[in-house]
Amino acid sequence: MNRSSFIFHHSSLILLCAALATALPHASAQQYPTKPVRLIVPITAGGGLDTIARAIGQKMTEIIGQTIVVDNRGGASGTIAAEAARVAAPDGYTILMTSATLVIRPLLYKVPYDLARDFAPITQLSTQSYLLMVGNAVPAKSVAELVAHARANPGKLNYGSVGNGSQIHLLTELFRTMTGTQVIHVPYKGITNAYPDLISGNIQFMFGSVITGQPHVRAQRIRALAVSGPRRVKAFPELPTVAEAGVKGFSVTQWYGLLVPVGTPSEIVDFLNKEFNKTLQQPDVAARLAAEGSEAVGSTPQQLAAHIKAERARWARVIKDAGIRGEE
C-alpha cells in the first residue's frame, strides 16, 4: 500500500469510528427500554407517595412492556433517594420520584444533590391538597372558628407535622403568618405517629394528606375543616378550600414529579415524558388518584423545571419570614 492509499484508508477509518460513536447513543435510545426500569421513591413502602408510584408504575409497565420496579429509599427527607439517583448511570433505567420535600431540604440542610444541576425533568405526575383537621375537643367547626380560637388562646394550640422543615411544617407556618396566630409546632417522625395525638387531644390541629386523614375523618375520630389547595377535592366535595373559608390567597398542594440523572439522552427523556403522560391519561389511573385525593397532571419537562424553580423561591420566602432553621 502506498502512502496516499494508507492516508486515505486511515482517514476513512477515523471518520467511520466517529460516525459510529455518534450513532450508538442514538441507536441505544431508539431501542430503549430493553430491561426493567428502576423508579426510586424517597419514602418507605406504604405511604401516599409509594401508593401513587405503584399505581402509575403498574400501568406504565403495561404500556411500555418493561417492568417498572419501585425501589423505596426512605430516610433523611429524601436525601438518600436523591443521592442514589444522582450517581446512577444516565441511561434512562433509573428514575427519581420527587416532591416538594426534595426542593425544601437543600434550603435548610447541606445535601449532596442539586435538583437543577444533577437532574433532568420528565413530567409532573400529580398534585394533591392537604386536609386541615382538628381534634374533636377543639371547639371549631370552620377555619374561621379555628383562627378565632387560636387568636383567643395564643401559644396554647399545638399542631403536628412530619418533621422540622417538612412541607407540612412550612405550610402550617405560612397559615400561621397569614392568620396572625401564635401556635406551637410539634414534629413527628411520621404522619401516622401524629394521628393518635390529634385524636387524643395532645395536639389540636394538623394538615395531613387525604390518603392518611380520610379513615380517621370518616370514623369521626377527628374533623376536617378545609382543603389546602386551589380547588375542592372529589374525596371531600363538601369541604371548602382554606382560601374559600376566609384565608385569602392561601393555596398549597403536595406534588410529585419524575427526574432522571443529568446527561440522559434527550430521546429517552422525550420517550419517558410521552409514555408517563399517556399513563396519567388512563381512566383507571386517574380514578385511583382521585380516590386518594390526588389529581393527575402531566406536563412538559420545561413546565416541571419551572414549577420546581417557583417552589424553591416560595419556600425560601416562608423559611425566611417564619425564621425556620434546620435542626438535625
Image (cartoon, grey):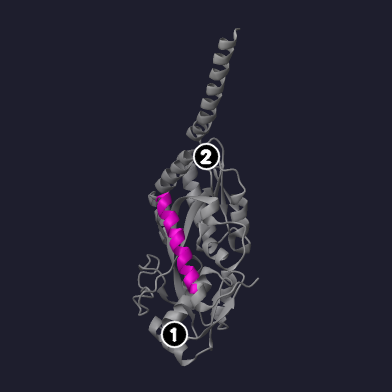
Magenta residues (range): 300-318
Q: Quadrant of the C terminus?
A: bottom right
Name the quadrant containing residue 143. Answer: bottom left
Residue 287 point in image, percent of width and height: 40, 56
- Give the mark, 2 or 1, whose residue is nearer the N terminus: 2
Residue 87 point in image, percent of width and height: 62, 48
Residue 279 magenta? no
Residue 275 seen in this snapshot: yes
Residue 304 magenta? yes
Q: Which residue is mark 1?
A: 180
Q: Residue furthest bottom?
A: 152
Tell me if mark 2 has few (under 14), some (14-19) or many (20+) residues whose alpha carbon lies within 10 angstroms of its own. Answer: some
Name the disc covering residue 66, or none. 2
Residue 203 higher or lower than 294, as above or below: below
Which secondary structure, mark 1? Answer: loop
Q: Which residue is painted at 35% across and 80% down in the image?
A: 246
Residue 293 seen in this snapshot: no
Q: Which amino acid type is marked by label 2? A: Gln
Q: Which residue is painted at 59% across and 12% down in the image?
A: 6
- Mark-to-mark CA distance, 2 and 1: 52 Å
